[in-house]
Structures are given as C-alpha cells and as structure tokens.
Image (tube, rainbow, N blue to C red):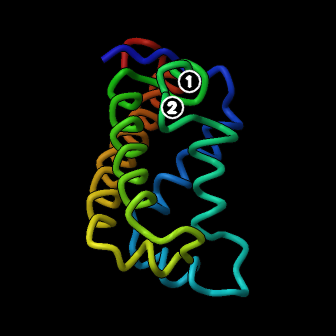
Amino acid sequence: MTDHGIEFPVSRLHVVPAVLALATPTWQREVWLNSEEFEDLDYIVHVLFDDFCDADDPAPWLGKSLRTEEEVALMKELGAAYSAVESAVSPGAGDEEYLEHPAWASAVAVAAKLAHVMVNNDLKAASRQHYGEES
C-alpha cells in the first residue's frame, strides 16, 4: 500500500497514541477512570474527531496525519464503531458507561487493528528514512 507520507507530523504524534489508548482496555481503566489523570475518553475523541483527524470522514487526512488508504479505511471503521457506542449510551454518559457497553469491545478491536497498522507503517517509514528508499 502506498505511503503518502505525513504533512503534519505533530498531528500524527497525537493520533497514534490516541488510537493506542483506544486499543488498550487496561489503559482506559487505569487512566481514564482516574480523576487525577489528564487523559480521558473526551480527550481521545477530540484528538480523533476534532483536532488532528476526523474519524467520521478521515479521507482528507490522507498524507496529513494518516499515511495509507488502509489507515483511512480503519479510521473510518473506528469512527463508526465509536459512534455506535456513543448513540447507544445515555446523553452525558461518563467514561465508565462507554467502557461497560457491550459494543465497546468492537471499538477496541478496530482500534487494535488500526494501532498495529499505524505503528508498523511508522516503523517502515523510519527504516526507509534511516536506510534509504530501497529498504
């Protein structure tokens, strides 16, 4: 799959950890449910839907914070999985209600796939940069 590069590397530095957080239920429970921590689900949603990507419509972010068409497709799938949970929980629901919802596991599974692809793509890009385009 073609790597379109990253025009906004700082955006990528926000998106990848946000996807990793969505892919890690242990992190979600230990960090998001801890009132002393900065990060929570709302923060992750702002990163992925508002600030550094648009998980509902990620195609315009190709070459900006997303490297490949596969990342775009998985981000769109993640946006749909999150939105399904969001529409199923009560308005104003807290993070714990999201994490307890039966459909949350689907969002976590898609995030895990996307995290794997993004990290792998970043490692390949770093290798190409270090060793040259032939790697």
In which image quadrant can residue 114 be found?
A: top left
Residue type at mark 2: give it: Ala
Task: Tell me which amino acid carries mark 1.
Answer: Trp
Q: Which label lies toward us, 2 or 1?
A: 1
Residue at the spot 44% in from the left edge and 37% down from the top edge: 123
- Can you say whether 100 is above or below 89 in the image? below
The image quarter in which residue 39 lies: bottom right
Query: What is the spatial separation of the Cα atoms under label 2 and label 1, in whole angstroms?
Result: 20 Å
Instruction: Find disc 2 in the rendering and name its residue.
Output: 126
Within 10 angstroms of label 1, few (less than 14), some, or many (20 or more) residues? Answer: many
Q: Which element type, helix, strand or loop, lies under badge 1?
A: helix
Q: Earlier in the sequence, mark 2 or mark 1?
A: 1
Residue 128 screen position, x and y as percent: 46, 22
Viewer-side residue, 49 vs 131: 49
Quadrant of the rendering where the N terminus is positioned: top left
In this rendered view, identify the residue nearer to me: 95 or 127: 95
Left or right: 36 in relation to 89? right
Quadrant of the drawing holding the C terminus: top left
Q: Would you place residue 64 above or below residue 51 in this image?
A: above
Rendering coords of residue 98 (x, y %): 44, 72
Front in this rendered view, residue 5 or 71: 71
Q: Residue furthest front?
A: 91
- Residue occupying the point 63% across, 63% down: 42
Image side of residue 4 versus residue 81, left or right: right
Tag 2's secondary structure?
Answer: helix
Circle 2 packing at 10 Å, graded few (<14), some (14-19), many (20+), is few
Q: Residue at x 27, y 58 (%)?
A: 106
Q: What label does residue 61 carry, if any?
A: 1
